[in-house]
Image: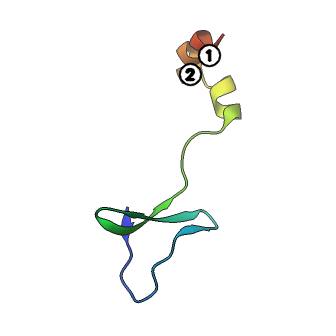
Amino acid sequence: MARQNGIIKLKGTIGDITFYKTKDGHLAREKGGIDAKGIATDPAFQRTRENGA
């Protein structure tokens, strides 16, 4: 995670970067995760599909 340094503190999303505020200060992070298509076809998510059925 990146920490925002500067006069202007951002809150929200620009492109794939999300800016937010926590008790530690203003931070930024990149969007991540796996899409639904990956869960539907990836063998690593076989148990996840079984549990969701």
Residue 28 disc label: none
Residue 32, relative to residue 3: is it above or below? above
**Badge 2 amino acid:** Phe
**Which residue appears at 30% of the width and 62% of the height?**
23
Where is residue 28, by image quadrant? Answer: bottom left
**Which residue appears at 50% of the width and 76% of the height?**
10
Q: Residues within 10 Å of mark 1 (few under 14, many from 20)?
A: some
Left or right relative to 6: residue 45: right
Taking the view exactly as shown, the residue that stands out farthest to the bottom is 7
Residue 45 disc label: 2
Q: Residues within 10 Å of mark 2 (few under 14, many from 20)?
A: few
- Quadrant showing the C terminus: top right
- The reply to whether the C-beta atoms of the residues labelled 2 and 1 are less than 8 Å apart is yes
- Quadrant showing the N terminus: bottom left
| Mark 2, secondary structure of its residue | helix
Q: Which residue corresponds to mark 1?
A: 49
**Badge 1 amino acid:** Arg
Residue 35, relative to residue 30: is it above or below? above
